[in-house]
Amino acid sequence: MSDTFDQPGQPDFPASPNFSAPPAPPAPPAQAPVEAFSFSGRGSEYFRIWIVNLLLSVVTLGIYSAWAKVRRLRYFYDNTTVAGTSFEYHGNPMAILKGRIITVVLLFGYQFAFKLNALIGLLVLIAFMVAMPWLIWRSLQFKLYNTSYRGIRFGFRGNAAGAYKVYLWLPLLTFFTLYLLTPFTHQRIKRFQHTESRFGASHFSFDGSVGAFYKTYLIGFGIYLAGFVAILLTIGASAYPFVGDQSFGAGHVFSFVLVILALYAWTFLMYPLFLTLMQNLIWNHTKLGEHGFRSEMRWGRMMFIAFTNIIGIVCTLGLYTPFAQIRALRYRVESMSLHPAGSLDDFIADNEPSGSAMGEGMTDLLDFDLSL
């Protein structure tokens, strides 16, 4: 066997230890698996929490409701899991109670002022509107700071100026434009909430466009209008006497009541549709660092859950409420998934707290929850 490459019409290349094939390109990094959210809460477990919270809140004239909220959220967070780990809630009931007292005082002051004098009532209303963005901003800080995952706290870096822009100026502008700016304002609010949120040292981002919000609103409104017209043309036609017939009997009264009930039911069914469209739009355009989220809610499924929940609540005189909340929350949570751009363990390690005292000092600063 020759030590050369014998190729017809080609020169012979002597074998040499320096001659070798080009190195193979490095293998692409393995794609991190999609991490689905899961919810393990059960209606029977939550019923016990719900009924105790309800009874103690009534007995204490609402004072216990702050502790009730902490128990409820801790149960929900403890049973919400992604990548094998659940979330934690660290809210302080006294901070929640403080926020509720402030809110109640403002609302009662508003009602009392208008009964006393229209001008004083207007001034109180203006003061309430001016205070509300600041209260919402502080509430957002409180809620995120008191949420953690794998021992790492969430946070909110948005400032009061941004809160006043999206919670005061834009809603006022929307009102004076006859609500034509509603999708625009909604997009700006969600962008403010998501882009200013963080997990440890990593920040969320949101790239949902204003056009996507207008499209979603138009789809929802178009479906609602089509159903509204269909009900009027079918059931509604029998609610009025025929042309030339001046009688208006019991059958027409029944049809008229049926139209009202059908319109009410259709309006109610639009809520799960809009909720589905919005959750998918918002979370499908949200990222945490390079990691994406995916929401795959389906309107038909959400509508079925909402419809059967309301039947269960009515038939049990409200006792089915905790079971209904668990069913709806489970579907919303389990429609979500996290799409890591790399190793989630490395990402978590990069966000480990540095051990500074800043976190401890933030507790007093954020010790407030509007809790509406």
Image (cartoon, rainbow, N blue to C red):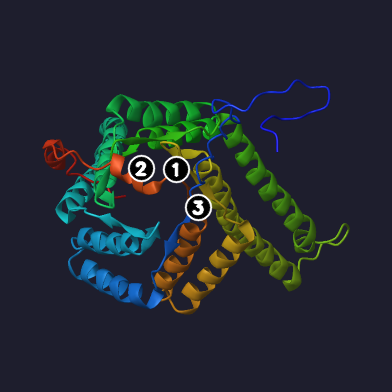
- Residue, far top: 11
Callout 2 amino acid: Phe
Q: How many marks?
A: 3
Q: Secondary structure at mark 2?
A: helix
Q: Which mark is residue 34?
A: 3
Could you classify mark 3 by the number of other residues whose Cα lies within 10 Å: few (under 14), some (14-19), or many (20 or more)?
A: some
Q: x, y (%) of residue 108?
A: 24, 47
Residue under label 2, please give it: 347
**Which secondary structure, mark 1?**
loop
Q: Earlier in the sequence, mark 3 or mark 2?
A: 3
The answer to which of 292 and 248 lies nearer the viewer is 292
Q: Pick whichever, 208 or 241, lies toward us.
A: 208
Q: Is residue 161 left or right of residue 67?
A: right
Label 1 sits on what residue type? Answer: Gly
Quarter where residue 304 is shown: bottom right
**On the image, which quarter does residue 235 sit in?**
bottom right
Mark 1 Cα-neighbour bin, 10 Å: few <14, some 14–19, many ≥20? some
Looking at the picture, does residue 54 appear above or below residue 285? below
Q: What amino acid is at disc 3?
A: Val
The relative height of residue 169 versus residue 99 in the rendered view (above or below) is above
Callout 3 secondary element: loop
- Between the residue at mark 3 and the residue at mark 2, the CA separation in whole angstroms equals 15 Å
Compare marks 1 and 3 and give the one earlier in the sequence.
3
Residue 182 visible in the snapshot: yes
Q: Which residue is mark 1?
A: 342
Residue 279, how many percent across, how many down? 52, 48
Label 2 or label 1, whichever comes before in sequence order: 1
